[in-house]
Every structure is written in C-alpha cells, then in structure tokens.
Amino acid sequence: MTAPTAETGAAPTRRDRLRAVPASRMHLWLMLVLTFTTGINDAVGYLGLDKVFTGNMTGNVVILGMALVGDTGLPVLGPALALLGFMVGAAIAGRAQRTAMTGWSRVTAVLLGLVALVMFGLGAVLLVAGNHPEQPVMVTTTTLAAAAMGMQAAVARHIAVKDVTTVVVTSTITGLAADSRVGAHRPGGTARRVLAIALILLGAAAGALALQAHLGLGLLLAGVLIAAVTVVGELHSRG
C-alpha cells in the first residue's frame, strides 16, 4: 500500500510519482524512446522507400558517395533531399530554441508534437498510397520524415543527454569501447550506451516487422511513441 504524503496525508498520485523522477533520469528515458523511433524510421526508409535513411545522415552521405560513381543501382535524389530536409528541420528547431532554457521547455513539447504530427500524416499518406507508392510519394515522404528527424535531433541536442543523440550511435559505440575495461577503463555511462545501441537496433527490427503488415504502419507507430514522449515530458516539466 502506498504511503501517504507528508503534506496532505493522501496517497501520492501517478502524477506525483512522475514529477518525483529526477529530470536527468526522465530526460534519459525519453531520449531512449526517441532513439527507438529512429530505428523504426530508418528501417521504413531504407527497406520500404528506396534505400533512404531518414535519421542516420551518415548512411545517406555514404550512399550518395557510392551512387555518384554510377552503375551501382543506388538512388541519388532521395538521399540528397533527405539530407537537405534533415538540415532544414534541425535549423528550424535550433532557431526555435535560441532563447529556450536548457533542458525541457514548452518549445521542446511544441517541436516534438510537430514531429509526431508529421509521422502521423506521412503514415496516413502511405496507408492510402499502398505498399508500392509512386516515386514522387516516396521522395516526398523521406524528405519530410528526414526533416522531422532533424528537428528531433536538434531537440535532443538541446536537452543534452550524454551519449544519446537519438539519431546515431557511432559516437556511443566509440565511447562504450574506449571507456571499457579493455580501453581507458573509465567507469560510468555503460548502461545508457548499451541501451541506446540496443534500442536503435530493436527499433529497426520493429520497423522491419511493421513493413510486413503495411508500409505506413511503422511511421504511425513512431508517431504514437513520439507523441507519448511529448506528453510525459511536458507533464513532468510542469512539476
């Protein structure tokens, strides 16, 4: 049975327990969920939308480099527009957060809410377009999804949870190996790094599984999770 609070004598509510979670821990959990959604988005983009990454821009740069050689069968337009979209989304979020306080703010909630809306909208478009959309639909979808991921990445950068960027794990893997017992043997951060790597992997697996049902399902799932992060983060910050 839950003990009553000292102030009121009443048992703490769910909202009270939510607000009692330290901000650093809450932000870590929320960013890890967003990392999972990146895995979903990249799986949908690469497997279902003509080999375009919407979160991992390193992958798009590599694809473009190989495609420019010619005769590789790799796309050029999709990855190029995804790169541009990602940068535009990140720039918009950066501009919006110029005067926002460090950590979670009302601007954070608005930006992540917009990301969730984009995911819902794109998922709905793909549900209508079917599992084999025309090229213009695919390119538009990956460009807008990349813009949303750029916005999400800029939000994560502002919240600044160490080793959890939500869109890439290369630096996380580097830190995990470099600070391990085999490396510099610097304690701390191992758990969050392992979780970030595992969650982007599991997100990619979830996105691939969702593709077996429908092309738009993965983006809808990502939208639900990002919306949940937005609501939980905002409720916590109000405490």
Image: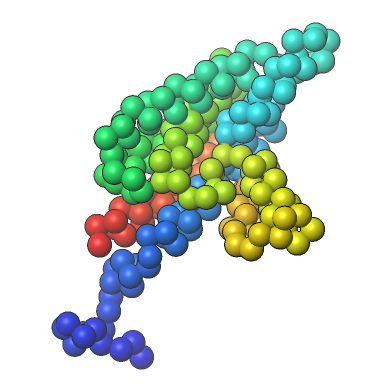
Residue 119 appears anywhere in the view:
no
Quarter holding the C terminus is bottom left
Residue 68 x %, y %? 74, 10
Question: In the displayed structure, does residue 18 sit left or right of residue 182?
Answer: left
- Residue shown at 41%/25% (left/top)? 91
Work out whether residue 183 or residue 70 is closer to the camera in this orientation and state it: 183
Q: Eyeballing the image, is 20 above or below 215?
A: below
Work out whether residue 182 or residue 157 is closer to the camera in this orientation and state it: 182
Q: Eyeballing the image, is 113 above or below 7?
A: above
Question: In the displayed structure, does residue 54 sit left or right of residue 156?
Answer: right
**Quarter of the figure with residue 198:** bottom right
Residue 4 x %, y %? 25, 87
Residue 187 appears anywhere in the view:
yes
Q: Which colour scheme is used?
A: rainbow
Q: Eyeballing the image, is 31 above or below 146?
A: below
Work out whether residue 156 or residue 206 is closer to the camera in this orientation and state it: 156
Residue 155 x %, y %? 41, 39
